[in-house]
Image (spheres, rainbow, N blue to C red):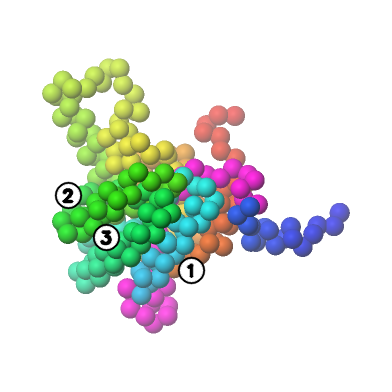
Amino acid sequence: MLISTSFFKSCKNPSIEELKKYGIPKHVAVIMDGNGRWATSKKLPRIFGHKKGAETLRETVITCKDLGIKYLTAYAFSNENWQRPRQEVLELMKLFVEVLGRELEGLIRNDVKLNLIGLRELIPSDILAVFENAEEKTKHNKTLVFNIAFSYGSRQEIFQAAKKMAFLYREGLIDLEKSDHNIFEDYLLTAGIPYPDLLIRTSGEYRLSNFLLWQIAYTELYFTKVLWPDFGRKHFLLAIKDYQQRQRRFGKL
Ligand code: IPE
Ligand code: IPE
Ligand code: MG
């Protein structure tokens, strides 16, 4: 049988229309890694990689909207990233404020709801205010929920949830006898958000770096060597295509 050239083209370059015929994941999470190496490989300061990475994230938000993905969670800054050199942390904070300021109108126009997932008590108040303003201005939007994991750490999140529950139990405010693990999830930073269906990590690192450890128990994992600043729409669509070829069993037959 002759296989048409368009078949081969679609394997390498799937289109939005084609992907939409099959199951689109409801929630995609991304570990946006490799900005620094991207810049260094071009003999540029690392911050240039972060700037280009912010553009890739913008494109990803649009692609998610076009595909009809309902939730996108992007790991933008980890709890451990606070330990980077002061200069890089300062430059990154400045960039987050700039980008949020610049993109807010577009998020509103595109009906995107921005949601900060992070250890808020560690975020400097002026930066937190910028995030919270964006959350407030987009809180009624429905088309895409865009979670930014910023100052996020999964172990800290899980421990805080356990602590909160222990406190409420001591006060007699919750009944543990009648509850299962679903109640625990109400105390996580992701309360109310479904589990990710697909997790993408760029830059050839095969680890989770303290990201959504509880939430990704049955998530499909996709690792690619492509550095985040180069991970444009074409690469994202390929990851979705890969996801569509998985068989999710959740332990059943
Ligand atoms: C990811 O890129 C962005 C952040 C962690 C803020 P990196 O800054 O980790 O880039 P590499 O891994 O050093 O190349
Ligand atoms: C994970 O990347 C955090 C983000 C992408 C925001 P890192 O570059 O911080 O992870 P490690 O240090 O390589 O594990
Ligand atoms: Mg990195």
Q: How many marks?
A: 3
Q: Secondary structure at mark 1?
A: helix
- At which x and y percent is residue 32? 40, 60
Residue at the left extreme, as displayed: 171
Residue carrying label 3: 81
Which image quadrant for residue 183? top left
162 displayed left or right of 217:
left
* Magenta stretch bounds: 18-47
Residue at point 33%, 65% (across, down): 102
Residue carrying label 2: 121
Q: Which label number is shown at residue 230?
A: 1
Residue at point 19%, 33% (across, down): 164
Residue at point 54%, 51% (across, down): 67
For marks 2 and 1, the one nearer the N-term is 2
Residue at the right extreme, as displayed: 1
- At which x and y percent is residue 248? 56, 38
For marks 3 and 1, the one nearer the N-term is 3
Q: Is mark 3 within 8 Å of ligand 1?
A: yes
Q: CA distance from mark 2 to mark 1?
A: 33 Å
Quarter of the figure that contains the C terminus:
top right
